[in-house]
Amino acid sequence: MRLDRWRQLDATDVLRRRCRGRPAGHAPLVATVVALAVALAVVPAAAHGGPRATAPGGPGVRAARAGAATTHGVSDPGTVPDGRIVFSATWDGDSEIYAIDADGTRLRQITRNRVHDWSPTWHPSSHKVAFVRRHGPTNDEIFTKSLRTGTVRRVTFSRWEYDGSPDYGPDGSWIVFDSEADEDGSRIRAVRPRDGATRLVAEWWDEGEAFMSAPTWSPDGTRIAYVVHEYAPPYIAFSDFDPAVRRRAARPDPADATAGNQTCVATNEGPRIDSLAWSPDGATLAFYGPASATHGGLCLLDVATDERRVLLYEPPVPMPGAWAPQGGYMAASLEAGDYYDVVVVDAQSGEIVPLVADAAAPDWVLRPE
């Protein structure tokens, strides 16, 4: 559902897993990803048109290219909905999970270890998060952590090299995620953490050249949207979800809107599609995708009519992570130089409010943990 597919992996992983088969025009993206994989560094204040907000002795104090968080207090908290935003950041040498109030207060570190943790998603209760953890030298798996007890559980145990992009379902019973291995294709799967039961939502067998990513639930839990990347332009696909159905083997096909349980929205030639986020009312799907043949933008898709509106076009363009539970705003990752900041975006005006520097992959929940 978010940027975890470009998150803090080593350069070899990034090139091997995410950039194969991409048009030559994406070379700048490769450079950005590799730079991001090395470390998240200081982003110039000019990226947001103003100085960084810092507090002596607090998390705003930063050691160049190394240390602590820089957070932005929102000047008018009444303009941003209430809630808690979880995100990943590399502030201490490896990627960890953090949470912060939507107004820029109450920063809390959730994971603390010597392995990479990234791409967090809130349980609807706000008492638990799921995230990706680098498990061993090549495997990425889905884990959960209780914010009340501190208990960490591994919830995926597969032969796939990469399990990522987790997104909790609206009732918290299931987590949807993407799963990929270089020689065995790509899948969208769902797992039930309480007993490890899994469901296959969609799959693509193509010798590792195509893959599916960024799954996100509809607010009613009956559909899952995701991105299909192939040699041709990527596109958004929708699959029904029924926990009683153990396997859905239909391959998404943009030329056949009735293929199996799939509905596909094809896109024009242009930049990649990434970072899907479904609005709380179910009417709109936000995503980063083609705003023109050469430029990406923050786009809003009307799910009922397939009409697309470009909200933001001029770079840098935020990549949506999650909508505010009340709607109207999105938490997003904004590319700033070679790195990312977490920002809040007004879904009507496109106004961008900086929140956390050198961080990415946000998710938003209504209640504090």
Image: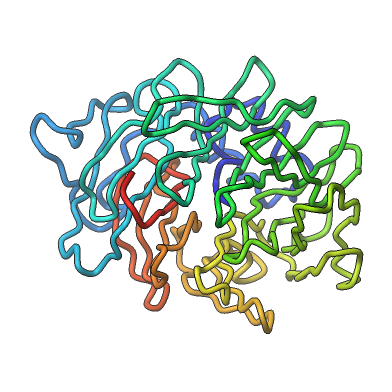
- Give coordinates of residue 211: x percent, y percent: 78, 46
Name the residue: 45% across, 41% down: 338
| Horizontal relation, residue 170 to residue 225: left or right | left
Name the residue: 53% across, 33% down: 144
| Horizontal relation, residue 250 to residue 305: left or right | right
| Horizontal relation, residue 103 to residue 201: left or right | left
Task: Count how many numbered circles sit on residues in the image.
Answer: 0
- Asked which quadrant contains residue 155, the reply is top right
| Horizontal relation, residue 359 to residue 2: left or right | left
Rendering colour mode: rainbow
In which quadrant of the rendered image does the C terminus lie? top left
- Above or below, 57 relative to 204: above
Name the residue: 41% across, 42% down: 87
- Above or below, 165 relative to 344: above
Name the residue: 91% across, 64% down: 260
- Give coordinates of residue 341: x percent, y percent: 37, 47
- Asked which quadrant contains residue 232, the reply is bottom right
- Asked which quadrant contains residue 21, the reply is top right
Q: Which one is nearer the viewer's eye here, 259 or 212? A: 259
- Above or below, 311 relative to 36: below
Q: Which one is nearer the viewer's eye here, 222 or 359? A: 222
- Give coordinates of residue 184: x percent, y percent: 88, 34
Q: Which one is nearer the viewer's eye here, 210 or 11? A: 210
